[in-house]
Image (cartoon, rainbow, N blue to C red):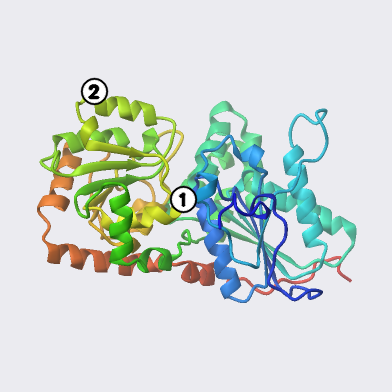
Amino acid sequence: MTLLDDPTLLNGTPTTPRDAGSSPTRRLVIIVRADPVVCGHSGEARNLAEAALLRGFDDVRIVTWPLEVLQQFPLKPLDSVLPYSAGITVERPDPVGDYKVPDGRFLAGMVGRLVELFAEGIPTVCLSLYLTPHANAAMEALRVTESLGVPFDVTTMAEAVGSDITNVVRSTLETGNVGAAAQVFATFLAHDHCVAVSEYTKSLIVASAREVDKVMNTNFVAQCRRRIRISYPAVNSATFTEVSDREIEASLAARCLERDRYILFLSRITPAKGVEDLIDGYVRSRSYGSTRLVIAGTGPIVDDMKARADELGAADHIDFLSDVSDDEKRFLMAGCAAYALPSKPQPEFVETFGIALVEKMLAGGGPVITTATGGIPEAVGEHAIVVPTSDPDALAAALDRAVLETSRDERATWELAARGYAMEFDRLNVFDRLIGPVPAPQLGSLAS
């Protein structure tokens, strides 16, 4: 069943496995840009939600945006998005107000729904993924709930990613709007628990906090250093490890691909992902021609990359796939001769972790080729061929090493070690480290 098969998965009609009339005893609320958005957080939210069910939460809510709002983001094909397990309710609150409210209508709807959930008095952990505006919604809902004078039982958590800082804080600092940057930090630190998706991300946060402290004489740096802990993104390892050879072969045959005869890029097609460098490196490699290059994904520069392939006379050797589902990607990863993600830092985006790299290491297949950009070293450890950024010649050499110079036994050893390392990011391991240390929620100060 997909989103299109069951409209309740789109509009958020609650469906839970509890008996009629029973009440939940512990709730997890995740505020996020959820499926079908092409975003690491949408997958992380799904994995944390599923892990919560396995760890005893009997009511899990994903509070997100209506599809009409999400249309501005890159989206997966709706018919490729799998449903959540029973017990996970996806809520997409309607906007509040009419055309006379120029902005904030959808955020107001989200805050209102959160107030309703918090005011039920059920012990709740509320997790905001991506600070702006989700952390704002959580804090505003908590403030309103406190003002009602009703019992409430909420522990708040906020998870920051690098683009929280690069897109919001740094841009405000560049324009001199330091008050907006201070608001992001104040809202983040107002949560009971503050986490970042990598050590690299925490370093970005601290560096930006230092700039705000200089201008406003605040003490955000000290608070960030003391309070932020690391919670790596959660991946469902079983999705990628429990795959049969028969499934892989059938999936590749449908794409007219042969196992170990193609190099795979599978991610957003943006300048920061180094797709052009990969195309240039592939054409310069000895693997060119005998091994295909498969570029799977969507993004703003797809047409530019197709034009680059034509310009180099390589179009007949490069496949662009824009319709790869979450289910199919694991087969493509498992069957490739090498997986290349040559990310490079850009003003608008820096790879703060690299979820796709972890998924690839879990799936098996040929070696990972990547760069040491941002948080990627934390994602791959010592289990990737690392090349300099913006270096097609180095990419060509790495492709040849992976495809032509690595024996079957070496590949098997590499694959096993990489999978073992990637298991650290299994959703249950991440959930236990993230939620496990959180004390049981305490009744709000106005509960009595």
Q: Find residue 158 and report its horizontal and vertical position in percent.
A: 61, 56
Q: Is residue 121 left or right of residue 129?
A: right
Q: What amino acid does circle 2 point to? A: Glu
Q: Look at the picture and state if 288 lies above or below 45.
A: above
Q: Residue at x 10, y 41 (%)?
A: 286
Mark 2 and mark 1: Cα distance apart in space: 37 Å
| Frontmost residue, 426 versus 228 | 426
- Is the N terminus in the top left, top right, bottom left or bottom right quadrant? bottom right
Label 2: element kind:
helix
Q: Residue at x 42, y 64 (%)?
A: 239
Q: Find residue 40 and report its horizontal and vertical position in percent.
A: 48, 50
- Is the C terminus in the top left, top right, bottom left or bottom right quadrant? bottom right
| Frontmost residue, 138 versus 322 | 322
Q: Find residue 359 and report its horizontal and vertical position in percent.
A: 38, 58
Q: Look at the picture and state if 443 lies above or below 332.
A: below
Q: Earlier in the sequence, mark 2 or mark 1?
A: 1
Q: Look at the picture and state if 87 lies above or below 389.
A: below
Q: Residue at x 70, y 54 (%)?
A: 12
Q: Residue at x 28, y 62 (%)?
A: 364
Q: Is residue 117 visible?
A: yes
Q: Is residue 301 left or right of residue 87?
A: left
Q: What amino acid does circle 1 point to? A: Thr
**Label annotation for residue 311:** 2
Query: Which residue of the protein is positioned furthest toward the top in this rendering?
Result: 311
Q: Which residue is mark 1?
A: 201
The quadrant in which residue 125 appears is bottom right
Q: Residues within 10 Å of mark 2 (few under 14, many from 20)?
A: few
Q: Residues within 10 Å of mark 1 (few under 14, many from 20)?
A: many
**Label annotation for residue 50:** none
